[in-house]
Image (spheres, rainbow, N blue to C red):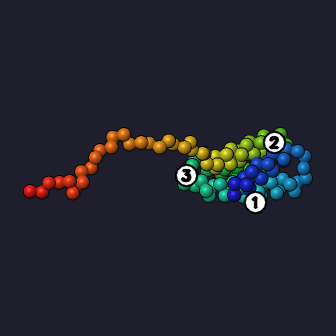
Amino acid sequence: MKYFIIIAALLCFISIFELPYGYYTFLRILVSFMALIIIVNEFRSRSFWLITFLLIFVIFNPVIPIYLYLKPFWLIIDIIVGLLFLYYFYTLIPKKKAEEPEIIDVKHQEIPKTRDRIIK
């Protein structure tokens, strides 16, 4: 799934150029599919990503498309969506933790042994 996010981001950046209409239909399908997958994954955990990708899903919806008719509007939207996909991909990569040094217990107490007791 992580690599499909990168592919969706790259396709958003490629859509800046003048391409045939079929490419933009393919872009709508792929971006809305990836947004739907992210919505399902983030349904219970993070509300920011849920709302953001819900909005992306509505804008790139291939069933009931939104037509803006002007290329500059779509340029801005494609760049923002590509950057959001890349940032979401970056948040999926786990951070490496620094190795913690071993802690030596200085306050060690001697536990009396049962054989050392004097029984009267």
- Residue 56 is situated, as x and y percent measured from the top left of the image, at 70, 49
Residue toward you, 25 or 45: 45
Question: Which residue is farthest left?
Answer: 120
Element type where label 1 sits in the image? loop
Quarter in which the N terminus is drawn:
bottom right
What numbered label is drawn on residue 100? Answer: none
Q: Earlier in the sequence, mark 2 or mark 3?
A: 3
- Residue 45 is situated, as x and y percent measured from the top left of the image, at 55, 52
Q: Which residue is mark 3?
A: 45
Q: Which residue is mark 2?
A: 75
- Residue 16 is situated, as x and y percent measured from the top left of the image, at 85, 44
Q: Residues within 10 Å of mark 1 (few under 14, many from 20)?
A: few
Q: Type of residue at label 3?
A: Ser
Whole-angstrom CA distance, mark 1 to mark 2, is 21 Å
Quarter in which the C terminus is drawn:
bottom left
Kindly identify the residue that appears in the image at 64 percent across and 46 percent down.
Answer: 91
